[in-house]
Image (tube, rainbow, N blue to C red):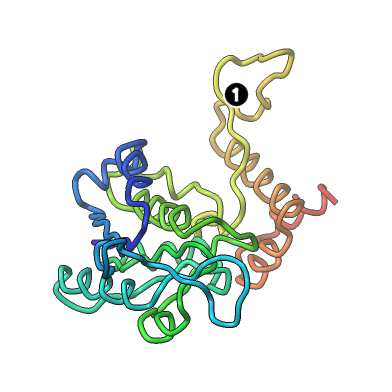
Amino acid sequence: MRFDVLTLFPELFAPFLASGVTRRAFESKQVEVVLWNPRDFAEGNYRRVDDRPFGGGPGMVMMAEPMSACLDAALAARGGPAPVVLFSPTGEVLRHATVEQWSAGDGAVLVCGRYEGIDQRFIDARVTHQLSLGDFVLSGGEIPAMALLDAVARLQPGVLGDEASHVQDSFNPALDGLLDCPHYTRPEQWRGVGVPAPLLSGHHLQIERWRRDQRLAITQDKRPELIAAARLAGALNADDERALKKKL
């Protein structure tokens, strides 16, 4: 798959693409990332990409024409149409199910806005999807773009050291959409606190029951709406319900 990223700050992506376990996906081009700077498509000696907003107000607005010309070049290099994703507070909140959909596709063009935003005419004419990381505002779309790329890359075969790793992640359907359980490693005692006994028992069913109970308890405490969704989907059995009652 291929992701073309439109950004005024392509240098921000260099350490991200070369670091961590997901670099395997980027270096092998299993997830190919191509960076495009709209400034390269702006006119004039100063390569201006922004201007004052009509109607007044603080800040600057990214101009439609340099963004559109940059997008045209990216689509031409791809050899055809592709989803065009803008990271925006008005977008759909990025969730695991959405990441899974993107991870199974052919990629997209990711548009990273800056300043007060992008001229709405470009958004209306060229953008096909809008995504958000949540109810807060960032300085630009680069961090959300990296978040999507990282989430997509780690779902690709062979990227993680253990193929089952992402199956145990929070929100994964394999865990019925629940949050993950706590994890422990050596030493067995750390500052007077021991590892929970079930994890030392060697009894696989007991260990799995403990992990399931922990997932249920944590999800009930932190994200009760996920418990409601799991119930609605018929994912909770009698043992699960008994575990939840014990925690109430």
Q: Measuring from the top left, give residue 143's x and y in whole percent.
A: 47, 52
The 10 Å Cα crowd at callout 1, few under 14, some 14 to 19, many 20 or more, is few
x 46%, y 60%: residue: 141
175 w.r.t. 165: above or below: below
Disc 1, SS? helix
Q: Measuring from the top left, give residue 58's x and y in whole percent.
A: 61, 67
Task: Quadrant for residue 193, please give it.
Answer: top right
Number of dots carrying numbers: 1
Specify the amino acid type for callout 1: Leu
Q: In this view, does 58 lie to the left or right of 74?
A: right
- Residue on which disc 1 sits: 200
- Considering depth in this image, is 191 or 91 the residue closer to the camera? 91
Q: Quadrant of the N terminus?
A: bottom left
97 w.r.t. 156: above or below: below
- Considering depth in this image, is 25 or 212 the residue closer to the camera? 25
Task: Quadrant for residue 80, please give it.
Answer: bottom left
- Considering depth in this image, is 221 or 85 the residue closer to the camera? 85
Q: Measuring from the top left, give residue 225's x and y in whole percent.
A: 71, 64
Asked whether residue 1 appears in the rendered view, the answer is no
- Considering depth in this image, is 136 or 149 the residue closer to the camera? 136
x 27%, y 56%: residue: 35
Q: Is residue 143 left or right of residue 23?
A: right
x 30%, y 44%: residue: 159
x 61%, y 51%: residue: 179
Q: Which residue lies furthest to the front in this view?
A: 45
Q: Measuring from the top left, give residue 47's x and y in whole percent.
A: 30, 63
